[in-house]
Image (cartoon, grey):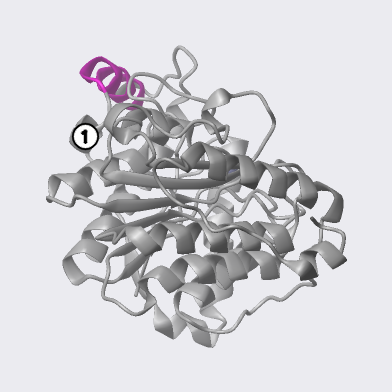
Amino acid sequence: MYLIHGTYPVTDARLTQLAARYSASLELLSTLPLAKEYRLVETEPADFEVYRLVHTSEYIELLERVHREGHSTVGIPAGAVVFERIGVGGTLTATRLALSERCTAYHLGGGYHHGMPDRPNGVDYCNDVAMALEYILATGAEKILYVDLDVHHPDGVQTIFEKDPRVLQISLHGWAGHSNEGHYSFIGRGAGAGKKINMPLPAHTGDRIYLQILKALLASVMRSYQPEVVFYQAGLDPYRKDPIGCLDLSLRGLYERDKLVASLCANRSMPFVVVLGGGYDLENTPRAVVNTLAALAGKNVVFDEAESLGAPSAARALRWYKSLRTCLRQYLELDEIVSSELKEEGYA
Ligand SMILES: [Zn+2]
């Protein structure tokens, strides 16, 4: 198994903090026996040429100019362009390794799933995830499973592949109610209809129901869909102490989540690409990264934490799951979640 990382220059405070999560995670890993499961690979910054997989020529020219001149312009900070070029390099290195060796490759970075082909979106100035998916498609793959469990909805990736049936997307994300694209009723367009599965979740959903829903979704999809490659955006911002997260997952819950996704690839030699994405609680993100690495390697949880329950919101989450089942009925039969145990505990 590979762990890909980069060396980030010190730029502004936000980016320096983001990069500090990566170095703290590597440092923590180096003190643990788990480290021997991973081969470390340092990435180079990507060439702007690979941006052509997704982005328009005009937009790439703009990014190149900002990079060359070092001056921020029209809402694009020069530091972010430099930073993301390293992130793109890491995600593509992970993708190439996973494809060529049919193995698991984890990139400690990247996951800029908001980036649009011709403009920045939020704090993402490009889209490394979409570039990797296009790269995989260009090798002839017809069935990619893209699982995005960052707390934020992957609006950029979804927009780019909304009509493409070759990318089956499953996203569980916090629901702030401000964008229609992450609503359960959005299932893709044209030939992509039924291939975009959006599961919005109310604030404070907690481990129990989150994991139930994820398990049901993965099992339902895998019954009828045999992916050739799994691409996983394993954002850690659903964590309960994350300053911009809201789903209240515990460290244990995140580990169980990663184990569920990893189990899809466990018994077959399937290329499995994983990128970090979000995770902004600086104290706990390195611990959560180590837990992700443990889950991918089939090892026990390293940093445990009591389960987070989230009962009142969970009932709402289950109602939304029911609605999602209805929206997808024509394309895919999703497992029902009926559990008397959940009922007894006041969830359903
Ligand atoms: Zn996020």
Provide the residue span drawn in magenta. Answer: 56-67
Picture coordinates of residue 137, whole percent (x, y) = 19, 46
- Residue 55 position within the rendered picture, expressed as x and y whole percent measured from the top left: 27, 26
Observer-nearest residue: 100 or 227? 227
Q: Which residue: 82% across, 55% down?
A: 310
Asked whether residue 64 is drawn in magenta, I would say yes
> Where 176 falls versus 258 (above or below)?
above
Of all residues, the one furthest to the top in this rendering is 74
Query: Closer to the camera, 199 or 13?
Result: 199
User: Mark 1 = which residue?
Assistant: 53
Q: Which residue shows up at 52% across the image and 84% down it?
A: 299
Q: Position of residue 67 (x, y in %)?
A: 34, 27
Disc 1 secondary structure class: helix
The answer to whether residue 187 is magenta is no
Disc 1 residue type? Leu
The quadrant of the rendering that contains the N terminus is: bottom left
Residue 215 vertical placement versus 146 (above, below) = below
